[in-house]
Image: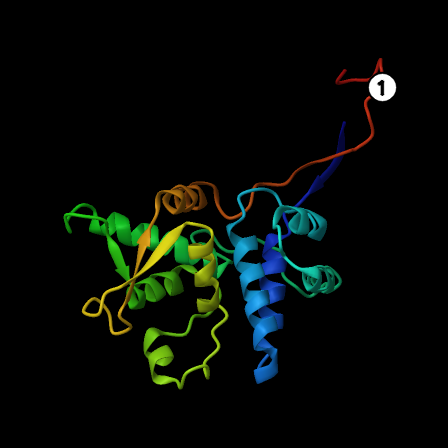
Amino acid sequence: MASGARYADRRFAYVRGLRARADGLTRAHEARSWEHICGLAARIGLHDGALPDRHTVLRCLRGAGPAAEEWLRQVDGNSRVNASPPPAGTFCSPSAALLVALLRHAEAMGGASGGTPLCPKGELIARARALCEQPFCSLEEQLAAPAGALRCASLQQLPALLTLGYAKERKRKGACPSGVVYELLPAGRARAEALVREGEAPPAAPLRSSRRVQPGEAGV
């Protein structure tokens, strides 16, 4: 039975709160936790259903791990974390911005290449950077840094697109200084189009009671 209360999706708070936590993990021994947090934030940003609380996140994102509940609980307990949607045309989540950037590249290329559009990594980063409220390291910064020395929490969300079957990474030496390009897959195109059309989160909706409706009550 619907109540008068309404929930607001919590993904914006979780994405921002997890980013703040990731940016604070700078020591070498914290690298695994940093990767885990970035991956969790990426999956939250790409999830296509409502996420009204951390319990829903953990139920919907299988394999989040035992540490995830504590990280999300800490975000819930921090009233300073901004839970508001980003400005129109901007994405809160780097993973969402990366996916839409791939769509924009594919749309710009059309069928001019005579095949599947492949987006150079440098162009992908530049396009996503322009769409996202969170900062991205440039490809030049990434290539100039010693191996493992540069941690960019936005770029670390890119592997989630591959794991979810939204994009495929390919090697093309002449296409980009990194030698890496990305192909937008059908599932990724569908999710990116939904992000553009509907935004990152569904609108606030009525809370539902788990109590069984009794005979004679409305809704039976």
Left or right: residue 92 versus residue 9 is left
Badge count: 1
Left or right: residue 150 versus residue 184 is right
Question: In the rendered image, which quarter contains the N terminus?
Answer: top right
The residue sitting at 41% across, 50% down in the picture is 166
**17 and 159: which is toward the camera:** 159
Which residue is under mark 1? Answer: 214
Q: Which colour scheme is used?
A: rainbow
Vertical order, 108 against 31 (above or below): above
Vertical order, 82 against 109 (above or below): below
**186 and 75: which is toward the camera:** 186
Left or right: residue 45 versus residue 14 is left
**159 and 96: which is toward the camera:** 159
Q: Quadrant of residue 3?
A: top right
Farthest residue toward the bottom? 146
The residue sitting at 39% across, 84% down in the picture is 145
Question: In the rendered image, which quarter contains the C terminus?
Answer: top right
Identified by mark 1, the residue type is Gln
